[in-house]
Image (cartoon, rainbow, N blue to C red):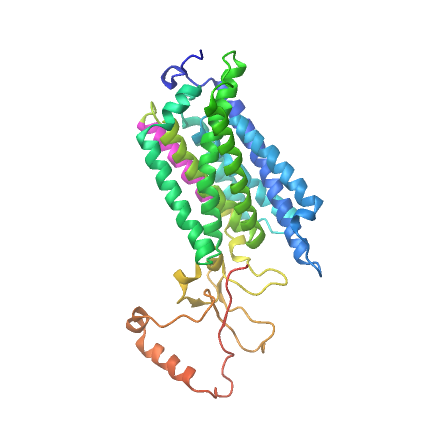
């Protein structure tokens, strides 16, 4: 019979802490390489006269293999360190993506990006230093007991409800936006993290001489881990295919990190025994990591006019178009200048502002109260079938990249 591995009596050894951190960092580096390789294959495929399915490209499979190896590294890390420590170290993925995107996708590295890297290192230091110093390694019976917790059952119901809403938005309402893809990926990833840590812990106990292979819960958690990992990769890959990698990678990092930390708190009680100072500094480290992600990608977020693609706004990728339907501005430069994107098919002497929605939005009551005079003038101009000489070309709308 396997012994009980009570978290109150299982202080985390420093060598295990460093080993878990090292495995997580190496795994995240491999994942970053794999994502950029897969994005590169999608870009090259779109430039072909006749596109072929990405699964027929050997380079895409190389990226998938590297992602698998990276996930194995992360999986192993969960056996040596808390999930709340392993997940935030995914910031190394964003740092690596900065330089790999410069190599594969020819994106520029700027001073503010390097500042973001420095902030990320500080954040990672705080996370490692003030993370939970007690590792929760559960045997099969403890896993079953944790699954029966009321708090965990409520958590699962909320997660499944959110997943159902997201799938309805994606397939029912056809709202294909990067936030929806990545939220689906992060929700399923929370179950991947829980099951991966459970399986890793039971294997670790088995290797220690207390076999767990005769318990069905081991195989149930293994199936959950594989199934949710496949779903996670599917929607993450769709996001990488359809949206800018400089948006997908950092946004996925933020969503995944918050999801994994919450899962660790609910299921493994990883914040139990931590002082208020430890929790505060740990949260500060996470916030610094999020800030670092912004600085690492701040310039690339505005570089959304891809070669051979229609002009588009970053808001169209990050936020569903209907939420910003009344926005009618040009591209905002990092230094505050406003530049109107020009359609190369139109007269270049005219400036053509763009809308973030796919269809001209109706004028709302708020618009009328805000600027009634301007709204009335625009309505009169649109009602005139013969525009005056020298009038700017009609407004064009561009949605998010599909």
The residue drawn where x is 54% and y is 48% is: 111
Q: Does residue 254 sit above or below 314 in this rendering?
A: above
**Residue 80 visible in rendering:** no
Is-magenta flag for residue 211?
no
- Residue 174 visible at all: yes
Q: Residue furthest left?
A: 369
Residue 61 lies, with reference to residue 329, above or below; the image says: above
Quadrant in which residue 309 is drawn: bottom right
On-image quarter of the C terminus: bottom right
| Magenta span of residues | 276-294
Q: Quadrant of residue 84?
A: top left
Q: Position of residue 62 (x, y in %)?
A: 67, 40
* Foreground of the two, 173 or 318: 173
Q: Quadrant of the N terminus?
A: top left
Which residue is at a point 35% across and 27% down the rendered structure image?
148
Q: Nearer the viewer, residue 329 or 50?
A: 50
Where residue 2 sits in the image (x, y, percent)? 45, 13
Picture coordinates of residue 180 (x, y %)? 45, 51
Residue 357 in the image: state x and y as whole percent. Answer: 45, 65
Q: How many labels does the image show?
A: 0
Overall secondary structure of the magenta section: helix
In magenta segment, residue 278: yes
């Amino acid at each position: 019979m396997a012994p009980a591995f009570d978290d109150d009596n299982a202080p985390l050894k420093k060598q295990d802490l460093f080993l878990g951190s090292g495995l997580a960092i190496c795994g995240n580096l491999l994942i970053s390489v794999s994502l950029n390789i897969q994005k590169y294959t999608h870009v090259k495929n779109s430039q072909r006269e006749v596109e072929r399915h990405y699964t027929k490209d050997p380079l895409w499979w190389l990226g998938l293999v590297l992602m698998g190896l990276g996930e194995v590294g992360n999986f192993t890390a969960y056996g040596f360190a808390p999930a709340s420590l392993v997940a935030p170290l995914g910031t190394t993925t964003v740092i690596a993506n900065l330089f790999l995107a410069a190599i594969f996708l020819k994106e520029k590295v700027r001073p503010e990006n390097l500042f973001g890297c420095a902030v990320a290192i500080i954040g990672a230091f705080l996370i490692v230093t003030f993370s939970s110093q007690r590792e929760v390694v559960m045997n099969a019976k403890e896993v079953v007991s944790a699954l029966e917790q009321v708090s965990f059952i409520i958590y699962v119901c909320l997660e499944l409800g959110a997943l159902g809403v997201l799938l309805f938005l994606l397939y029912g309402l056809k709202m294909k936006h990067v936030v929806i893809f990545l939220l689906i990926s992060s929700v399923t990833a929370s179950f991947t993290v829980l099951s991966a840590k459970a399986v890793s812990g039971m294997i670790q106990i088995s290797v220690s001489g207390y076999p767990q292979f005769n318990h069905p819960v081991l195989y149930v958690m293994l199936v959950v881990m594989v199934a949710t990992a496949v779903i996670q990769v599917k929607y993450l890959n769709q996001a990488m295919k359809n949206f800018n990698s400089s948006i997908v990678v950092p946004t996925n990092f933020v969503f995944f990190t918050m999801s994994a930390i919450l899962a660790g708190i609910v299921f493994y009680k990883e914040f139990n025994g931590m002082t208020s100072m430890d929790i505060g500094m740990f949260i500060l480290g996470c916030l610094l990591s999020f800030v670092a992600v912004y600085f690492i990608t701040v310039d690339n977020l505005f570089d959304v006019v891809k070669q051979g693609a229609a002009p588009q706004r970053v808001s169209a990728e990050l936020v569903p178009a209907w939420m910003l339907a009344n926005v009618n501005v040009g591209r905002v430069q990092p230094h505050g200048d406003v530049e109107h994107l020009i359609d190369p098919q139109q007269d270049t002497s005219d400036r053509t502002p763009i809308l973030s929605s796919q269809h001209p939005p109706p004028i709302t009551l708020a618009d009328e109260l805000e600027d009634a005079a301007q709204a009335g003038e625009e309505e009169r101009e649109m009602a005139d079938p013969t525009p005056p000489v020298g009038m700017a070309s009609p407004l064009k709308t561009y949605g998010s990249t599909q």
